Amino acid sequence: MHRIATAPRAVNTPMPLQFDLDTRPAILPLYFRALTARKPGRLPPGQERVLASVLLGNQAVDPVHLQIYRDVCGFGPGQHLPATYPFVLAMPLQLKLLVSEAFPFPVLGVVHVRNSITQYRPLLEREHLDIRCDLAAAVAVKRGYEFELLTSVRVNGELVWECVSTLLSRTPHGEAKVSRPSSGKKAWVAPVDEGCASAVNWQVPADIGRRYARVSGDRNPIHLSASTAKIFGFPRAIAHGMWTKARCLAALEEGAYAGTLPDRFTLGVDFIKPIFLPAEVLFQSAQSATGTGFSLSSGGRRVNLTGALVHC
């Protein structure tokens, strides 16, 4: 069940939507709507900063689901949630916002270009989480429109985790002047081209897209098989961006931080090029006084991802 509320608005200003959920929404109906919903493909006049919000309270962590996530992404055992795990819990909420009438663009073809997660303290497996997702207004950029999904997690009113996902809709706007969101600059640059402290090759199996889809609920056809990816113009299936981010975090936890990540940090990445499955990728990292930069590359010098874990 869910309740829809509307915030007060000025005359001729679109009314923000708010969904208050009792349970996580089912994924398959949302994907069906993503495939069939008719979207105007243009920005409405007089947008609010936040177009829509969804709230889901008192969510317990399923230990079986968490263990499957750990296995798929390469995390070892522990009492704390991996910092990327709340993103999986919030994914159905984000999809609900994207298929709502507040989002004006077709969902298929939207590209995840940047992601930043801030952990204010470690989350315990036994804690109950209050999750909120906000859909921010789109901004015209050179390649189309960028918009942000803002996700926060609170425990007993305490803000413990935040995430900013920047997505791109390659919808033509025909505007001479474009801008970029203030948080949209490429800040996550890994200084690992020379003299890197660590470099290791990973084998990424052909089925990792299907395995991550089962645990995350993200069953976008471009990740599932070569045949379904080809429908959307890809020669082979591609790895989920958030799987690659989680896999990098697991590698940092195991390597550079020797099993002990700082309690407070921001983990940001730029998704640059897709990883075609199966693949051999090179993970490089280099530490500094303020954090660790890292990158993933494949096929020689094809950079797939750059990122940084910054101590708070």
Image: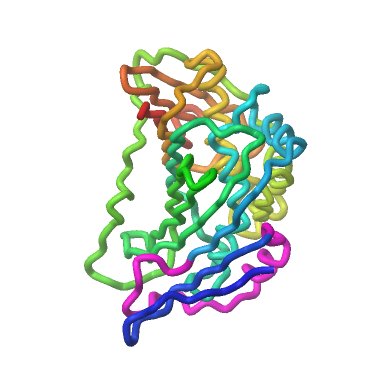
Total marks placed: 0
- Which x, y percent locates residue 27? 70, 59
Question: Residue shown at 49%/16% (left/top)?
Answer: 257
Q: Picture quarter containing residue 29?
A: bottom right
- Which x, y percent locates residue 94? 55, 58
Q: Nearer the viewer, residue 124 or 86?
A: 124
Question: Residue shown at 42%/52% (left/top)?
Answer: 166
Q: Which residue ends up furthest to the right in the rendered image?
A: 64
Q: Nearer the viewer, residue 157 or 112?
A: 157
User: Residue 28: within the magenta?
Assistant: yes
Question: Residue shown at 49%/54% (left/top)?
Answer: 111
Q: Which residue ends up furthest to the front in the rendered image?
A: 156
Q: Nearer the viewer, residue 308 or 221?
A: 308
Work out which quarter of the rendered image holds the C terminus and state it.
Answer: top left
Work out which quarter of the rendered image holds the N terminus and state it.
Answer: bottom right
| Residue 206 against residue 216 in the figure, above or below | above
User: Over which residues does the magenta segment extend?
Assistant: 23-52
Left or right of 260 on screen, residue 231: right
| Residue 110 against residue 152 in the figure, above or below | below
- Which x, y percent locates residue 95? 59, 60
User: Residue 113: within the magenta?
Assistant: no
| Residue 233 against residue 269 in the figure, above or below | below
Scheme of colours in the image: rainbow
Q: Is residue 229 visible?
A: no
Left or right of 183 on screen, residue 161: right
Q: Picture quarter containing residue 76?
A: top right
Q: Is residue 172 visible?
A: yes
Q: Nearer the viewer, residue 221 or 188?
A: 188
